[in-house]
Amino acid sequence: MKKVIAIDGPAGAGKSTLAKRAAEKLGYVYIDTGAMYRSVAWKVLQEYRDSKFTDADIAAIADNLTVTLSYENGSQRIAVDGTDVSEVIRTPEVTAIVSQVAAISSVRRKMVVLQQKMASNGGVIMDGRDIASKVLPNADVKIFLTASIEERANRRYKEMKEKGFEVDLAKLRDEIAARDKADSEREESPLVRVPEAILLDTTNMNLDEAEAAIIRLAE
Ligand code: CDP
């Protein structure tokens, strides 16, 4: 039977890399919900490049845009009003405002409807912050994926360097810690580990080990 697998956890825990690899192995679809909030944040920056914006401005933008997910050789692509934004949503500028965007309830409501629709036929691995608690409370497997803040900062540092971004490790660590705090303390669907979620701490695991652990749990 094709299952529904929910993976939650803090920034840089390796959720997307691992969920993607596990989905390939299992023949499931991987749904990256963070990309949806990032795409709204990207659109906000397009419209308010050098000017200030409020939560109401963000809500209005989210209300009027269409986010579409599609799959190319098993990889998720994401588009905003028909423009592919799969790469541009990963810049530090987008990352800097995404938690503000994701804390707005109307933005979340819109994205959650899409996420639930995509999972309705099973055979999916979805990752995010509120998947087990809010989006898919009946998921067959719930995993809370984490790693120490130092390890998560190191991994993100390597990833950003490889993509050609100039990054500072200490700054990155502070940014991740601030985002974790904002995501965990917000009123609307905060990042939580539901009691039934299995804790997977990957601080001392390599990718193969962590992937094998997820596959075991899925099976
Ligand atoms: O890749 P990384 O772990 O840095 O973040 P992401 O999964 O792309 O998510 C970016 C941001 O979107 C998070 O910091 C949250 O603020 C928000 N998010 C959320 O609120 N709910 C989700 N289900 C997924 C992401």
Image (tube, rainbow, N blue to C red):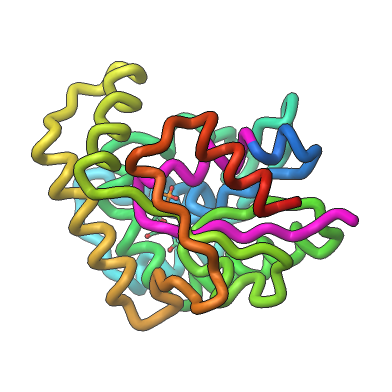
Picture layout, residue 100 above or below residue 35 = below
Q: Nearer the viewer, residue 46 or 86?
A: 86
Q: Position of residue 201 (x, y in %)?
A: 40, 51
Q: Judge from the rendering whether residue 24 lies leftward or rightward of residue 160; answer left or right.
A: right
111 or 148, which is in the foreground? 148
* Image quadrant where one finds the N terminus: bottom right
Give the image location of residue 16, x and y in percent.
52, 42
Q: Nearer the viewer, residue 46 or 100?
A: 100
Q: Residue at x 34, y 17 (%)?
A: 162
User: Residue at image x 66%, y 53%?
Assistant: 217
| Residue at 55% over, 57% down | 7
Q: Position of residue 116 (x, y in %)?
A: 71, 67
Question: Which residue sits furthest right?
Answer: 1
Compared with 137, 181 (above or below) is above
Q: Which portion, as a residue range, is magenta?
A: 1-21
- Quarter occupied by residue 169: top left
Ligand 1 quarter of the rendering: bottom left
Residue 8 belongs to magenta span: yes
Where residue 197 sits: x, y (%)? 54, 69
Is 199 one of the magenta-colored residues?
no
Q: Is residue 29 left or right of residue 203?
A: right
Above or below: residue 151 compared with residue 62: above
Residue at 47% over, 61% down:
199
Question: Toward the viewer: 94 or 143?
Answer: 143
> In screen coordinates, is 122 left or right of 58?
right
Task: In the rendered view, tell whether residue 57 sits above or below residue 74.
Answer: below
